[in-house]
Image (cartoon, rainbow, N blue to C red):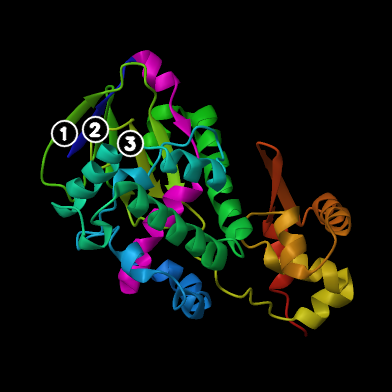
Amino acid sequence: MLRYLLTEDDVGSVRFGISPLCELGLSLRAIKEPARFPLQLGWLRRTEEARTRLDMPTLMALIDERMWTPDFLNPRPTSPLTRLDDELEALAAIPADVFRGDLVAVHGAVPEVFAGSASAAMRRVIRALQQLWDTCFEPYWPRMRAVLEADVVYRGRQIAQSGVATMLNGLSSRIEYDHGVVSVRLADPNDRTQAIDGNGLTFVPTMFTRRASAPVGDGPPMIMYSARGQGALWEAERVANPAAVAAVLGETRASLLAALGDPASSTELGVRLGVTASAVNQHLRVLRDAGLLVSTRYGRSVLYLRSELGTALLETRAG
């Protein structure tokens, strides 16, 4: 059990962030044991061929049989949405003793693949992670990021409407909050208690944890939890009568409506449908004004989601 102790000020400063590097590191769980991550089987299928070209000995040396990964792969986000380039730059700068210590904390010893120079081993790790990103994440990141952003927006709305306690107790069945204590039930049999002491507690939504995860060591206070809205992320949208909907809305607007079963930004939609950003925005405004979509802002992005009326339209069958 991990317990974070929060003062009243700490409760008020709970924050959220999205970390591409966390996603890379945690994705090794799904790659290692696909059956444990059924919601990501679509991603695994789409990236199967690309993964044959990766440095798998290096990547698999970053995870153990308990599905633990070293803390240097789980940096606390410094902003609501960090950039992978910045995170990899920070990773390259960590001291050799931290690199080795984080590996030992997971494996009990430094894996053979990382024997010798720590700087050479770190370069190999960064190169393998960059390849994983380029081939398996970058093509799908806008779609994945939209789900993560939408989750953060949802949690923020919960705090505004019902308070921090309600939000915290709704994150996961493994996370409980009571009278200033956030308790996380982990696979780690050891009990750990850590006071926040003004350092801030950061929550990180992810696609690659089933319940909740936390740093292996006593690093900055952070909890990674399963993001909402993953269920249909990799499923093709099923429209009962696409021809009828297209006849009413037009092909492009019907496709946009079908694609918005989960939150997405106009940029992502443009890439997915091969439509210019300006055209997508124009169509989205029309659909929203007609009550077929709803929208919400996250940072600089606006996320769109099909409304109940839009879903009802897609389910219309020909008479």
Q: Which is nearer the N-term, disc 1 or disc 3?
A: 3
Residue to which mark 3 is pinned: 95
Quadrant showing the C terminus: bottom right
Q: Are marks 2 and 1 in contact (CB under 8 Å)?
A: yes
Amino acid type shown at disc 3: Pro
Residue 309, percent across and down?
A: 72, 59
- The magenta stretch is 8-36
> Which residue is rendered at x = 53% and y = 76% of the image?
46
Residue 192 is tagged as: 1
Give the prevailing secondary structure in the magenta stretch: helix
Q: Which one is in front, 316 or 31?
A: 31
Q: Position of residue 141 (x, y in %)?
A: 59, 58
Q: Residues within 10 Å of mark 2 (few under 14, many from 20)?
A: few
Quick one: SS at disc 3? Answer: loop
Disc 2 to disc 1, C-alpha distance: 9 Å
The foreground one among 90 and 218 is 90
The amino acid type of the residue labelled 1 equals: Arg
Identify the disc placed on residue 218.
2
- Earlier in the chain: of badge 2 and badge 1, it is 1
Quadrant location of the N terminus in the rendered image: top left
